[in-house]
Structures are given as structure tokens and as C-alpha cells.
Amino acid sequence: MSRQPRIILGIDPGTLVMGYGLIAIDGTHISLVEMGILKLSARDDHAERLHLIFKKIDSLIRQHQPVEVAIEAPFYGKNVQSMLKLGRAQGVAIAAAMGHGLQTVEYSPRKVKQSVTGRGNATKEQVWQLLQATLKFTEEDPYMDATDAVAVALCHHYQLGSPIPAAPKATKAVKAKASSWEAFLSANPGRIK
């Protein structure tokens, strides 16, 4: 009797572009199930965009049956209106997951980057490159929202005490040498699967 892989849904909330990514964990093997974006029109009413976010998350959960959901916490900026809208988008995504009996765990952008790359200040491009190497995919993500969502799902997996180790803490010597992405990869060969 074969057991089903554990599916984790990662969400990068947004009111104009929402990223989503699903990963499957089967023992020690992690694979990409699906990643993409929901691009919303700025001309649509904000309430309509929230409804579309709810429907997309609901559809993804029905289709892939994830057992866990992770979402990126909003980055606190200076524009209060943007923060309110982003918080609503996040709330709608959480409500969709809760409608299926799924708890949602939030991770800060810095925590996601640190879990996936070993550096909390890694660039989006560095996160994308490491995800490509780890999950063996070639898809491009022009918005970086889909790969951000996959990173959130992978971060959640690492936070659960996975048998696959999270990025090791870098020493000062490694931090000094890791000025390029290639240097980071050579200093952390265990991160590439």
C-alpha cells in the first residue's frame, strides 16, 4: 500500500498579482506540483479581486488536497492603504483555507529567505535560482510571485523539522565569502538536491 505524498500550498498574497505554489513531500523527496500566479486587473473593484482570490485558493485546495497551507506575512511599508488591501487579500486566502479545515501558518519574507537560502537578505533572484536547483524545474516566473509562494511552502516544510535539513547557519567566514550566488552554492552543497 503506497502512501500519498504530503502536499503543502504556499501563498504570496497580493491584490494585483497573487502567487501560489504547491510542493509534494514523499519521504525525503520534495517535488514541485504546480506554481503560478493569479493576475488581477487594477480596473476591477477591490471586492471583486478579493472574491477571485478566494475562488482561486478554494479551487487549488479542491484540486490538490494540500494538508498544510503557508502564507507570506505582509511586508510593513509606509502606505497604509496598500497595507490594508494586502491584509484583506491575505485574510481572504486564509478564510478559503479555513473553509476546508486547514490551518494557515504565516512567515515573514525574511524568515522565508533565510530558511530557503540561508540568508535573510537574499534577493528574489537568488531564491528563484535555489528553488530551481532544489526542485529541478525550469519554468520562468516573470513576476517572482509564484516562486516566492513555492519558497513559502518550502520554508514551512523546513520549519516542521523535516528530515531534509534546512540551510545551515553561516559563519562569519562563510558570510564574507558568500558575496555571490555561486559562492553560496559552493559553500552549501548540501542545499542542492
Image (spheres, rainbow, N blue to C red):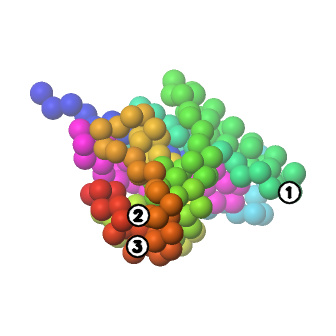
**Left or right of residue 113, residue 4 in this image:** left
Q: Residue 189 location, x and y as percent?
A: 30, 62
Q: Is residue 129 visible?
A: no
Query: Please, what secondary structure does the residue beneath circle 1 have?
Result: loop
The answer to whether residue 186 is above or below residue 65 is below
Q: Residue at x 12, y 27 (%)?
A: 1
The answer to whether the residue labelled 3 contacts the one labelled 2, judged by CB atoms less than 8 Å apart, is no
Kind of residue indicated by mark 3: Ala
Mark 2, residue position: 130
The label on residue 78 is 1
By secondary structure, the bulk of the magenta-drawn segment is best described as: strand
Tell me if residue 142 can be seen.
yes
Which three-letter amino acid code belongs to the residue tagged 2? Leu
The span shown in magenta is: 12-35
In the image, taking residue 30 as reference, residue 166 lies left or right, namely right
101 to 28, vertically: above or below: above
Q: Is 47 situated above or below 125?
A: above
Q: Residue at x 56, y 35 (%)?
A: 105
Say which of 168 and 162 sits in front: 168
The image shows residue 33 at horizontal and vertical percentages of 35, 51
Q: Where's residue 138, x and y in %?
A: 35, 70
Callout 2 environment at 10 Å: few (<14), some (14 to 19), or many (20+)? some
How much space separates mark 2 and mark 1, taking CA atoms?
Answer: 30 Å
Mark 3, residue position:
183
